[in-house]
Image: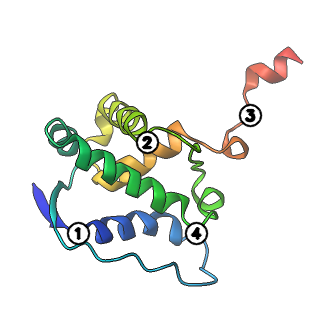
């Protein structure tokens, strides 16, 4: 099932994943409203199929979800997602799609939620990573 969604709405939905953790001290900068709408599949499994013929749209959407997670620099504290500076958007998109593809349990989840989960898992902040038990044994 597909639904029509504007880019701005999709980004704001992704932001809501992190926004509940702490109140904002100042309102986020306003993004210009998208003039065109794009059919983005609601479920992650359908999104993967959509991306096979809409690579640029998917790469842009994944980038927007990542930007929403990162927020104004405070996003890492709230979400555990640390974007890599200078990362190739196509590589990030490919890694996110593979992460979702290899986790069938995510295919029924909301697209933006699955993308957010993938980004957090693939690019965690060092402080957010749990300590590796093998490192303790090696010391």
Mark found first going from the N terminus, 2 or 3: 2
The residue labelled by disc 4 is 21
Q: Which of pointers 1 and 4 indicates the residue nearer the eye?
A: 1
Determine whether 46 is above or below 11 in the image.
Answer: above
- For label 1, the crowd category at 10 Å Cα-Cα, with few meaning under 14, some 14 to 19 and many 20 or more, is some
Residue 137 lies in quadrant: top right
Judged from this view, the residue extending furthest toward the bottom is 26
Mark found first going from the N terminus, 1 or 2: 1
Residue 131, numbered label = 3
Mark found first going from the N terminus, 1 or 3: 1
Find residue 84 and report its horizontal and vertical position in percent.
Answer: 58, 42
Q: CA distance from mark 1 to mark 2?
A: 22 Å
- 39 relative position to 107: left or right: left
In which quadrant will I find the N terminus?
bottom left
Image colouring: rainbow
Q: Which of pointers 1 and 3 indicates the residue nearer the eye?
A: 1
Determine whether 76 is above or below 9 in the image.
Answer: above
Seen at 59% across and 61% down, the residue is 75
Find residue 43 and report its horizontal and vertical position in percent.
Answer: 22, 50
Q: Which of pointers 4 and 2 indicates the residue nearer the eye?
A: 2
Secondary structure at badge 4 equals loop
Is there any visible trace of residue 44 in the rendered image? Answer: no
């Amino acid at each position: 099932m597909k639904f029509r969604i504007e880019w701005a709405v999709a980004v704001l939905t992704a932001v809501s994943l992190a926004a509940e953790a702490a109140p904002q001290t100042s309102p986020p900068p306003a993004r210009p409203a998208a003039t065109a709408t794009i059919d983005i599949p609601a479920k992650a499994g359908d999104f993967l199929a959509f991306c096979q013929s809409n690579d640029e749209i998917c790469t842009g959407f994944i980038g927007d979800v990542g930007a929403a997670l990162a927020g104004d620099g405070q996003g890492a504290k709230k979400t555990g997602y640390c974007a890599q500076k200078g990362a190739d958007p196509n590589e990030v998109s490919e890694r996110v799609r593979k992460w979702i593809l290899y986790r069938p349990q995510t295919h029924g989840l909301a697209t933006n939620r699955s993308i957010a989960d993938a980004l957090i898992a693939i690019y965690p902040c060092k402080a957010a990573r749990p300590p590796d038990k093998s490192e303790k044994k090696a010391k």
